[in-house]
C-alpha cells in the first residue's frame, strides 16, 4: 500500500509528532509512506526510516502558496499513484479535496483539534471519505458542527513509542548542554509556545517562587518555541532574577523531547507530551489552555481519556491549582509515586501504543479504498457475535487471502460492523442491511460464503434462508460465488433440501472441510465432480507465545497439569450432562493431578453451563474474558488434552497436536473426529462417563504417540486450508 501524508510542516508540535510516529509505525508494517509538507526539523528523521519527503508550501493560506501547492500535489499524486492520500490540517485537506475531484483517489483526514466552523473558515474546511479523530470529544464536535456521518469517523489515539520514551533514556548530553543542577526535584514542561498553547507555562512560572520556599533546589525546565516564546522567556528571567539563581531553564524548540522527559521528577503538560511523560513513568499533571485535569491517576483517567488529555471542559489552569498539585506530588511517598508512575506507564502501553495507532489508520485506509474501487471479496458468515470459532474462521480467511494478495479489498457482513472493521482491518456492513448488501454485491467480484456450517437447517430455517438469499443475490448481480471450506448439513426439511440444491447448483466453486459434507451434497443430487475437500481455515492459525499471564489469572501455575473443557448448552444434552462432565473432571484431577480449565467459546452462551459444572468440581477455573484466538490456541497448546463439544475447540486442539475427546452434539463433530482419526468420542444425548474416564487414562498413557499423529494430520490440514485461499485468489 502506498500512502501520501499531507501536513502543514514538520517542526515541533503535537500533530507533527503524531504524523512522524504514525509514519514510522506504518513503515515497520511494510507500508510505503511519502510525506508532503513545507519541511522542518523532523524531515531528516522521517527520511532516515525510509519515508520520501516532498517540499510543498502547505504551511499557510496565502493564495500564491495554495495555488502552487495545488499543482505540486497534483503532479506528485499522478506520478506516484498513491492508494490513499491522508491530510492532517485544514489547508492540506482543502487542497487535497479539490484534487480528489479530478484524480479520484481515496481520501482520509485526521482531526487533531476543533476547527472553527464559522465563516470564512468553513469554506476552507474539507473532510475525507473517512476521518480519524484523536479523541471522542473531537468526534462529537465534528458530528455537531460539520454534520459528518458518525460511521465515517474513527476515534484513534496519539500512539507513543515506549522504547523511545522511557525512564532509562540517557539525558547526560542535555544536562551538560543546559547546565542541569543536581536538583532532587526537576519539573519539565513541554509545549508549543504559541499564545493559544502556553497558558500552563505562564502559570507554572508564576508558582515557582512559592514552590522554591519549601524546595530550595527545585529546577524547572520549559521546552518549546512559538509566537509567545519571548514573553515566556521574559517572565522566566524575571523570576530567576528575583530568586537570585537560575531556577527556570528555557530551552527553545527541541526534537530530543524524550531526554528532557527522562530527566523529570514531575511533568506538566497536555495531550501527546503528557502521554510521552507517562510512558517514561514520570508523575504527570495535565494542564493546558483548554482546561485543567490535574494529577493523572485512576481518579482522573476517565476525564483524561475522554479529552485525549487536552482537558476540554474541565475547569481552568490556575497558579493555585498547579502549585497545589505539584506540592502533592513532591510530598508523595516512594510507594505512592511508584503506584501512579506505573499506572500511567501501563495505560500508555495498553491503550496508546504506536502499533494500535497504525492499525487504526490501516483500517480506515482500507475502508476508504473499498469505497473508491470495486470490492474484491464480500465474506458472508456468522461474524460479529464474539464466537471464538467463527472469529477464528474469519481471521484465518483474511490472513491467508492477504498473504497471497496484499492489496485485496475485503468487506465482511457482521452483526457488529464497527468492531469487525477495527479488529480485522476490513470494510464491514451490518449483516441485515439488505439494501447496502445489494449495492455492495453490484461492485463485488467474489462472494465467499463461509466458513463454518452455514448451509444447514438444524439451527433454524431463518438462518438457512438468510445465507441462501445472499448467494442468490450475488448470482443475480453477476458476482462469482464460492463456498469456502463449508460444512454442509444436516438439512432435514424437504423444502429446504430443494432450496439448497437449486442455490448451490448456481455457485461457481464449492470447497468443503470434510468428506461427510460431500456425501450430503451427493444426497441432494448435486454433482461433486468439481467439488474440492480442503480443510477448515482455522488450521492456518498460529498460537500466541506468551500465555503465562492468562494461565496465572486462572490459578494455573508453572508446572501444573491441566485439561481444557469446552461445552455448550444444547437441547438434546443428556439429562445428567453437567453431573457427568463434573465427574469426569474430578476423576482427571484425583487420579492424574490434572486440573480442569473451562473454556466458553461464546461467553454469553457457554459461560453459565461451564460455571455450573465447575461448581461441582473440587478445583479448576473458567476463562471469563473474550480472548483473541491466538491466545486461546496458546492456552490449548499447553493442555494435556481437550474435552470439547464445539467443533472449533477440537480443531484448535488438533492443530496444536493436543489429544481430543469429542462430545458429539452435531454430525460435524463426529465427522471431524473421523477425519483426524480419533476414536475418543461420546454422544451428548447419552454420555457414558466411564468411557470418558477410560479415554482420559488412555490419553495420559499414550499422549506423545497421539500428539505425533495429530501433528501430521495438522500439517496436512494447514496445507489444504491454504489451498482454499489459493482457489479464491484464482477466481479473482
Image (cartoon, grey):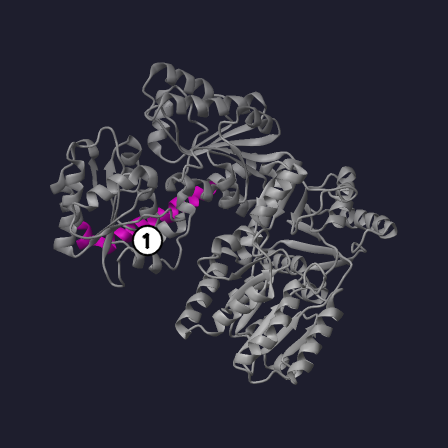
As for residue 541 lying within the magenta part, the answer is no
Closer to the camera in the image, 622 or 375 = 622
Above or below, comparing residue 430 to residue 564 in the picture: above
Closer to the camera in the image, 708 or 201 = 201
Closer to the camera in the image, 679 or 294 = 294
Going 23% across and 38% down the picture, which residue do you hit? 663
The image quarter in which residue 365 lies: top right
Task: Note whether residue 10 is visible.
Answer: yes
Quickly name the residue at label 1: 635
Going 68% across and 59% down the picture, which residue do you hit? 16
Above or below, comparing residue 69 to residue 439 in the picture: below
Q: Position of residue 467 (x, y in %)?
A: 45, 25
Above or below, comparing residue 290 to residue 204 in the picture: above
Q: Which residues are magenta?
A: 697-723
Total number of numbered labels?
Answer: 1
Q: Position of residue 104 (x, y in %)?
A: 73, 38
Amino acid at each position: 500500500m502506498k500512502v501520501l501524508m499531507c501536513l502543514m510542516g514538520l517542526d515541533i508540535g503535537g500533530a507533527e509528532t503524531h504524523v512522524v510516529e504514525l509514519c514510522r509505525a506504518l513503515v515497520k508494517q511494510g507500508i510505503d509512506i511519502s510525506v508532503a509538507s513545507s519541511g522542518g526539523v523532523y524531515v531528516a528523521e522521517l527520511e532516515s526510516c525510509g519515508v520520501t519527503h516532498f517540499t510543498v508550501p502547505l504551511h499557510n493560506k496565502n493564495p500564491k502558496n495554495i495555488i502552487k501547492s495545488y499543482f505540486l500535489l497534483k503532479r506528485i499524486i499522478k506520478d506516484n499513484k498513491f492508494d490513499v492520500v491522508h491530510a492532517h490540517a485544514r489547508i492540506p485537506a482543502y487542497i487535497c479535496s479539490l484534487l480528489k475531484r479530478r484524480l479520484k483517489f481515496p481520501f482520509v483526514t485526521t482531526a487533531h483539534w476543533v476547527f472553527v466552523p464559522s465563516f470564512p473558515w468553513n469554506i476552507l474546511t474539507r473532510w475525507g471519505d473517512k476521518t480519524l479523530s484523536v479523541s471522542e470529544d473531537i468526534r462529537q464536535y465534528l458530528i455537531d458542527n460539520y454534520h459528518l456521518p458518525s460511521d465515517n469517523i474513527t476515534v484513534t489515539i496519539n500512539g507513543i513509542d515506549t522504547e523511545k520514551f522511557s525512564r532509562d533514556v540517557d539525558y547526560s548530553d542535555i544536562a551538560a548542554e543546559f547546565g542541569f543542577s543536581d536538583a532532587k526535584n526537576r519539573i519539565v514542561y513541554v509545549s508549543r509556545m504559541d499564545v493559544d498553547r502556553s497558558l500552563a507555562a505562564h502559570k507554572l512560572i508564576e508558582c515557582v517562587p512559592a514552590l522554591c520556599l519549601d524546595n530550595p533546589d527545585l529546577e524547572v525546565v520549559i521546552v518549546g518555541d512559538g509566537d509567545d516564546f519571548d514573553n515566556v522567556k521574559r517572565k522566566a528571567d524575571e523570576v530567576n532574577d528575583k530568586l537570585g539563581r537560575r531556577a527556570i531553564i528555557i530551552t527553545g524548540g527541541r526534537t530530543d523531547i524524550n531526554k528532557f522527559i527522562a530527566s523529570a521528577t514531575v511533568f506538566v503538560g497536555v495531550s501527546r507530551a503528557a502521554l510521552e511523560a507517562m510512558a517514561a513513568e514520570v508523575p504527570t499533571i495535565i494542564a493546558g489552555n483548554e482546561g485543567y485535569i490535574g494529577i493523572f491517576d485512576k481518579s482522573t483517567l476517565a476525564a483524561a481519556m475522554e479529552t485525549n488529555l487536552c482537558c476540554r471542559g474541565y475547569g481552568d489552569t490556575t497558579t493555585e491549582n498547579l502549585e497545589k498539585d505539584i506540592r502533592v506530588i513532591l510530598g508523595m511517598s516512594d510507594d505512592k509515586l511508584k503506584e501512579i508512575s506505573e499506572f500511567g506507564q501501563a495505560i500508555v502501553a495498553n491503550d496508546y501504543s504506536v502499533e494500535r495507532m497504525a492499525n487504526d489508520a490501516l483500517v480506515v485506509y482500507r475502508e476508504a479504498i473499498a469505497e473508491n474501487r470495486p470490492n474484491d471479496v464480500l465474506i458472508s458468515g456468522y461474524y460479529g457475535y464474539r464466537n471464538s470459532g467463527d472469529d477464528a474462521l474469519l481471521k484465518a480467511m483474511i490472513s491467508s487471502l492477504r498473504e497471497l494478495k496484499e492489496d485485496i479489498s475485503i468487506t465482511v457482513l457482521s452483526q457488529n460492523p464497527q468492531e469487525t472493521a477495527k479488529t480485522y482491518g476490513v470494510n464491514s456492513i451490518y449483516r441485515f442491511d439488505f439494501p447496502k448488501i445489494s449495492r455492495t454485491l453490484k461492485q463485488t467480484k467474489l462472494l465467499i460464503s463461509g466458513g463454518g456450517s452455514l448451509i444447514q437447517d438444524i439451527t433454524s430455517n431463518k438462518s438457512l434462508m438468510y445465507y441462501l438469499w445472499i448467494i442468490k443475490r450475488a448470482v443475480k448481480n453477476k458476482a462469482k460465488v464460492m463456498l469456502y471450506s463449508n460444512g454442509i448439513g444436516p438439512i432435514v426439511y424437504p423444502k429446504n433440501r430443494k432450496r439448497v440444491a437449486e442455490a448451490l447448483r448456481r455457485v461457481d466453486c464449492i470447497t468443503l472441510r470434510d468428506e461427510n459434507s460431500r456425501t450430503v451434497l451427493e444426497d441432494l443430487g448435486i454433482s461433486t465432480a468439481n467439488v474440492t475437500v480442503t480443510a477448515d481455515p482455522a488450521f492456518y492459525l498460529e498460537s500466541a507465545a506468551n500465555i503465562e499471564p492468562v494461565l496465572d489469572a486462572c490459578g494455573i501455575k508453572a508446572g501444573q497439569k491441566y485439561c481444557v473443557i469446552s461445552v455448550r448448552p444444547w437441547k438434546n444434552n443428556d439429562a445428567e450432562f453437567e453431573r457427568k462432565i463434573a465427574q469426569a473432571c474430578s476423576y482427571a484431577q484425583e487420579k492424574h493431578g490434572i486440573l480442569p480449565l473451562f473454556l466458553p467459546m461464546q461467553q454469553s452462551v457457554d459461560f453459565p453451563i461451564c460455571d455450573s459444572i465447575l461448581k461441582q468440581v473440587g478445583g479448576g477455573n473458567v476463562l471469563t474474558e473474550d480472548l483473541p484466538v491466538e491466545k486461546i490456541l496458546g492456552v490449548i497448546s499447553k493442555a494435556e488434552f481437550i474435552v470439547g463439544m464445539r467443533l472449533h475447540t477440537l480443531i484448535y486442539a488438533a492443530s496444536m497436536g493436543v489429544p481430543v475427546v469429542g462430545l458429539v452434539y452435531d454430525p460435524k463433530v463426529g465427522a471431524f473426529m473421523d477425519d483426524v482419526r480419533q476414536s475418543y468420542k461420546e454422544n451428548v444425548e447419552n454420555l457414558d462417563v466411564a468411557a470418558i474416564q477410560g479415554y482420559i487414562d488412555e490419553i495420559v498413557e499414550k499422549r506423545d504417540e497421539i500428539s505425533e499423529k495429530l501433528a501430521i494430520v495438522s500439517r496436512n490440514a494447514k496445507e489444504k486450508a491454504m489451498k482454499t485461499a489459493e482457489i479464491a485468489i484464482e477466481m479473482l
